[in-house]
Image: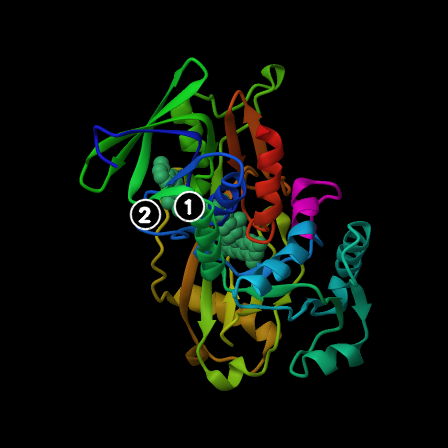
């Protein structure tokens, strides 16, 4: 886009991660849609730095958006991947207790999964655990056969293709820097990598800015601390880093066939350092749960660090006692955008509409799994 150009569309979506692109392809069936993204292609941030697990909806509060959209997203994800040539494997997943002291909490997770009507979720016997994962030495496990893994980057590419086929316009290397309201229209200012300024006018502005969603809301003019009396939710996000270490010994990788999770630690900010398989036969340990200070910004480099190497070795040896330091190397790093604050319990996704402005906040896990139903939710909010 150039300075002279003023693009006018029904809907402007800021952010081309999986969520922004899923929304773009869905809304473009009915409206004129433009997507702007600061990077040179889709899914350069959280959407390509995650565990790639197709979740089944076990942990979340019953009836919450995370629960409902994840559960619906689970079956739709397999169908989508099948019909759009995206690699996905319905591997199933185990949640395990390493010793007797963890059995009560394992039971709580089981009860939550049953309450959430997670498909075919069950407690299995030691023999069944052994049949599924012979190398695991645990005292109990839950089995979720509909959990799986997906190639997250190619999922985003498939959404991008579908959005373009539905005539959405996508402008990469364009960063949203300012938003004014002119009557009922949004006038958004963008800057490209050559410092060229351009303008988009839209009736609706959908904020899928991921880690930057709160900063974008601030640009639009919202007070991030919220105001219950005015129906304004808290928009402020905290960021929680999740780093991974990869298992680089192919013989060790072959020992495990599916994601294996410890008990969750929601207050720490995640589901616990787990073993995740990927669609290419890789095996990864992670993600860590590290609350970031307000002045820190995401850094996607994960340099070898003796502290983290030792921590991941400890976490990994619980699953695979034969694991050694030389089997591990730093992997990817992802960043969770959270409405939840450090020390608080799990919070829900925030999908909120206000006079044509649609805010997607706290879209952490299971946002990948839930991306298709999230798009439908946005469609119903603006229709
Ligand atoms: C460690 C980790 C593990 C996870 N594991 C899983 C999992 O196993 N299963 C699962 O279902 N989910 C998982 N998730 C969650 C999932 O990855 C996210 O919910 C999902 O990727 C969010 O997608 P998004 O499009 O909202 O955000 P993003 O992918 O972050 O996209 C936001 C986009 O907005 C762009 N943007 C921001 N500001 C501007 C601006 N001013 N102008 C233009 N563009 C802008 C950014 O560049 C970015 O591309 C995990 C997340 C993390 C961090």
Q: Residue 219 in the image: x percent, y percent?
A: 38, 26
Looking at the figure, which quarter contains the N terminus?
top left
Mark 2 Cβ and ligand 1 under 8 Å apart: yes
Height in image: 226 above or below 93?
above
Q: Which residue is mark 2?
A: 39
Q: Residue 86 in the image: x percent, y percent?
A: 52, 64
Tally of marks: 2
Q: Residue 372 in the image: x percent, y percent?
A: 59, 48
Q: Secondary structure at mark 1?
A: loop
Mark 1 Cβ and ligand 1 under 8 Å apart: yes
Q: How is the image coloured?
A: rainbow
Q: Residue 123 in the image: x percent, y percent?
A: 81, 67
Out of 230 and 303, give the one closest to the viewer. Answer: 230
Residue situated furthest bottom in the rendering: 251
Residue at coordinates 52% horizontally, 71% vertically from top-left?
279
Q: Marks 2 and 1: CB-CB under 8 Å? A: yes
Residue situated furthest left in the rendering: 194
Height in image: 174 above or below 323?
above
Looking at the figure, which quarter contains the C terminus?
top right
Out of 58 and 246, give the one closest to the viewer. Answer: 58
Among the two numbered marks 2 and 1 on one chain, the one whose residue lies closer to the N terminus: 1
Q: Quick check: can you spot residue 116?
A: yes
The residues colored magenta run 60-71
Residue at coordinates 46% horizontally, 22% vertically from top-left?
222
Badge 2 local density, few (<14 within 10 Å), some, or many (20+)? some
Q: Quick check: can you spot residue 291?
A: no
Height in image: 212 above or below 266?
above
Q: Which residue is mark 1?
A: 16
Residue at coordinates 67% horizontally, 60% vertically from top-left?
263
Badge 1 local density, few (<14 within 10 Å), some, or many (20+)? many
């Amino acid at each position: 886009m150039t300075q002279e150009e003023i693009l006018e569309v029904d809907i402007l979506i800021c952010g081309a991660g999986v969520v922004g692109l899923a929304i773009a392809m869905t809304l473009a069936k009915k409206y004129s849609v433009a997507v702007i993204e600061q990077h040179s292609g889709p899914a350069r941030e959280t959407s390509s730095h995650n565990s790639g697990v197709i979740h089944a909806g076990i942990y979340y509060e019953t009836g919450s958006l995370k629960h409902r959209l994840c559960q619906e997203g689970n079956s739709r994800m397999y169908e989508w991947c099948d019909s759009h040539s995206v690699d996905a494997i319905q591997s199933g997943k185990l949640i395990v207790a390493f010793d007797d002291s963890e059995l009560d909490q394992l039971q709580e997770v089981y009860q939550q999964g049953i309450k959430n009507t997670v498909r075919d979720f069950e407690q299995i016997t030691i023999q069944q655990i052994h049949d599924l994962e012979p190398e695991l030495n645990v005292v109990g496990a839950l089995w979720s056969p509909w959990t799986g893994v997906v190639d997250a980057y190619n999922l985003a590419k498939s959404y991008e293709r579908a959005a373009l086929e539905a005539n959405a316009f996508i402008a990469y290397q364009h960063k949203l820097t300012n938003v004014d309201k002119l009557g009922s229209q949004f006038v958004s200012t963008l800057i490209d990598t050559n410092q060229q300024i351009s303008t988009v006018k839209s009736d609706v502005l959908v904020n899928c800015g991921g880690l930057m969603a709160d900063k974008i809301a601030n640009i639009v003019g919202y007070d991030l601390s919220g105001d219950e009396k005015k129906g304004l939710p808290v928009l402020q996000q905290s960021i929680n880093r999740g780093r991974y270490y990869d298992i680089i010994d192919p013989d060790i990788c072959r020992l495990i066939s599916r994601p294996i999770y410890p008990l969750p630690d929601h207050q720490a900010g995640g589901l616990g350092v787990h073993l995740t398989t990927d669609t290419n036969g890789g095996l990864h340990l992670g993600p860590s749960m590290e609350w970031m200070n307000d002045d820190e910004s995401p850094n996607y480099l994960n340099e070898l660090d003796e502290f983290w190497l030792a921590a991941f070795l400890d976490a990994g040896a619980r699953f695979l006692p034969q694991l050694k330091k030389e089997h591990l190397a730093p992997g990817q790093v992802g960043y969770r955008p959270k409405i939840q604050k450090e020390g608080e319990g799990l919070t829900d996704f925030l999908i909120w509409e206000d006079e044509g402005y649609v805010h997607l906040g706290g879209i952490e896990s299971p946002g990948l799994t839930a991306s298709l139903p999230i798009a439908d939710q946005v469609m119903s909010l603006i229709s």
